[in-house]
Image (tube, helix red, strand yellow):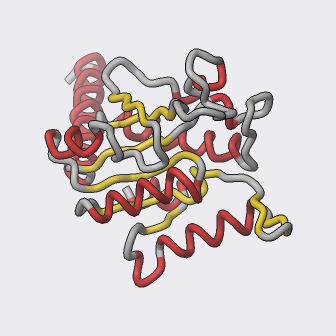
Amino acid sequence: MGNTCKRILVLWMTLISLISVNAQQKRKMENTALLIIDVQNDYFPGGKMTLDGAEVATKNIRQMLDYFRKHDLPVIHIMHISTNEGATFFIPDTPGVVFNSRVTPQESEKVIVKHFPNSFRETELLEYLRANSIKNLVITGMMTDVCVEATARAAFDFGFSNTIIGDATATRNRELNGEVVKATDVQKSFLAGISALGDLYARIVNTSDFLNEK
């Protein structure tokens, strides 16, 4: 066999191997979708509601997004638009409501607009998931203790199996009875609570651990 034929054979075998690996990944992640909640400009420096750790969380969300895109797996982007009187961020038709450029949806990816913390409330999310036979959700986004938590608990009640990528979520300092509760403590507390009782509402893993499982 000539050198040219050998090179063609090697390239062909490599291509077949890559196709096989991708098919295996799709089978392992069958009925699973990535949910990206409220990664919008107001949560970033210069926005109206800057979060602690938003930049780091978004880098990890981007890793998750790249993985799902690479393996042609479903991705759902949730966008919050504030409609209540007196709202101070995510105001319609402002730069702050726009998705952060690192997670801009592709044409094939589903975008769902919500007006409440729970991504299922008065949206088409449940209908869309059931229509596409999605049973498992991989949840990322912001804020950990508001929309991420509300969505994960609702998803559990609807019968979905949830995984939250802990380092792909972010929040901010809170206040309780005049005392500041640091964002790191808020983050840990809410992730611990939602995974209590044997990961009842959601399993919590970090980006690298999730990707290394696959």
Where does the N terminus fall, quadrant-wise? Answer: top left
Question: Looking at the image, is 43 positioned above or below residue 146?
Answer: above
Q: Nearer the viewer, residue 27 or 48?
A: 48
Left-right relation of 63 to 151:
right
Q: Position of residue 110 (x, y in %)?
A: 33, 29
Q: Nearer the viewer, residue 33 or 201?
A: 201
Q: Nearer the viewer, residue 106 or 92?
A: 92
Tell me the residue at 17%/40% (across/down): 132
Where does the C terminus fall, quadrant-wise? Answer: bottom left
Left-right relation of 69 to 43:
left
Q: Nearer the viewer, residue 122 or 112?
A: 122
Tell me the residue at 73%/53% (across/down): 172
Question: Looking at the image, is 49 positioned above or below residue 178?
Answer: above
Q: Position of residue 211 (x, y in %)?
A: 45, 53
Displayed quadrant of residue 122 = top left
Displayed quadrant of residue 129 = top left
